[in-house]
Amino acid sequence: MSDDRTGWAPVVVSRTHLSDTWWRAQPVDLNGEWRIRLWRAVLGRGQAHRLQEGSRFLLARNREGRVLVAVADMTGKFVPEFAADRVGRALHGMVGWLSEGPPAAAEIPALAWLRTEGRRVAAECFSEFVRDVWMARDDLSMGRPRTSEYGPAPWPAAETGEAPPPPAWREGHVTALPEERAETLWAALASTGEPYVVVTGWPAAHMADLSMLTHLTAATVTAETHLPVPAKEDPRQRSSGTTESGEERGRASGRSTAEQARGEVTRRNAIPTGVKVAAGCGALCLLVPGPALVKVVIAGGAFVVALTAHRLIGDAHARLRAFKDATRPIPQPFAGTAPGLHQEPKRRKAAAPDTEELL
C-alpha cells in the first residue's frame, strides 16, 4: 500500500460464551456515541433484530469524512464454534472497518465484494479478536475492547468508473429503495462526501430505526420511497399522547398563568404526605400514658417506621409505572400504506421474540 492510501482499523461487535459485553475490538479514536448509533442502525427497532433471516451491510460517513463499512450477521455464520452463549442463545454481531481519514471513493469496498469475499475476510477478523476471550470469565476487563490498529485495506480497490448520482434525500426523511438497487445506492453514496448512514438487506422496511438512517434497502420496498422520521417523544408526554403547555393547561382549567404559577410554588413548598403521616404517628405515641423517656423512644421509632414504609410504597409505585411504560407496544410509523411499500407477508408461526439486551 502506498503512503497516500487511507488506513483501516477493524471494529468487532459481539458477546462471548460467558460475557454479555459487546465491544471486542476498535481503534482508540472511534467515537463512542457514533459507534452505538451505527450498531442500533444495524439492529433496527425493538428487540427482534431478525438477523437470522439474512446479513445486513452498513456504510456510514461522519461529518469528518471518516467511513465505517461493516457486515452484520449471526456469529455462527462468521465462525460456527462461536454461535451461542452458555445458555444456548444464538448470538449476533458485526465486523467492520473504520477509515483513518476521509477515503477516496475507490478505497471503499464495493457491496458485491462484501457479499462474497468480504464474508470470508470478516470471519477471519472475527476469529482473531474473539477466540482468545471466548471462554474468558465475565469481569470488568471484558468491557474494554482490544485496540485495533490502522493498516492496509483487506479488499481490492473498487472500480473508478463514473458513479451514479445518489438518490434524492429530504430533510426529516429516510430514502428507501428496493433491495435490487442496493449495489447502485452503495456506489452512489461512496462517491459523495456528505454524511450518510445506509443499511441494506432489511427483510422489511418497518423494522428499521429511521432516526438512525439516511438510506435503506428492503425486500418490502417496491419503488423509491421517502419515509418520514417519527418525531421524538417528549418525556413529559402522558398516556394520551399529547403535551400541553402551562398556558394551555391554565385555559383548560379556567385558571390564569399567574394562578398556576402560585399553585406550582405551593406544591413545591408543601410538606410531603409521608412526613405528615410519620409526624402524626409520633405525636399519637406521645399522648399515650407512660414514662416520658419511653414515649419519646416509641414516638421516634414510629416516626422512622412510618417514613420508611411511605418511601417503600412510593418506590414500588414508581417501579410499577416504569414497568408499564416499558411494556407498552412500540408504535409503528407506517404499515405498508406509503407509496412504494407493500406489507410483509404474514407468517404461519410468529418468530419467538429475542429478549436479550441489544447494548
Image: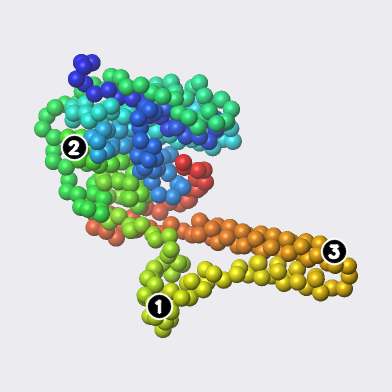
Of labels 2 and 1, the one closer to you: 1
In terms of secondary structure, where does tag 3 sit? helix
Residue at the bottom extreme?
Answer: 254
Note whether residue 49 is visible: yes
Mark nearer the N terminus (3 vs 1): 1
In this view of the protein, which residue sits in the foreground, 193 or 301? 301
Q: Which residue is pictured at 55% across the width and 31% down the height?
A: 140
**Residue 258, numbered label:** 1
Q: Residues within 10 Å of mark 3 (few under 14, many from 20)?
A: few
Instruction: Please tell me in which quadrant of the rendered image residue 308 appears.
Output: bottom right
Q: How far is disc 3 from disc 1 in space, using C-alphas?
A: 49 Å
Q: Residues within 10 Å of mark 2 (few under 14, many from 20)?
A: some
Mark nearer the N terminus (2 vs 1): 2
With 320 as the anchor, is 308 left or right in this view? right
Q: How far is disc 2 from disc 3 in space, using C-alphas?
A: 80 Å
Q: Disc 2 designates what residue? A: 193
Q: Is the C-beta separation of discs 2 and 1 under 8 Å?
A: no
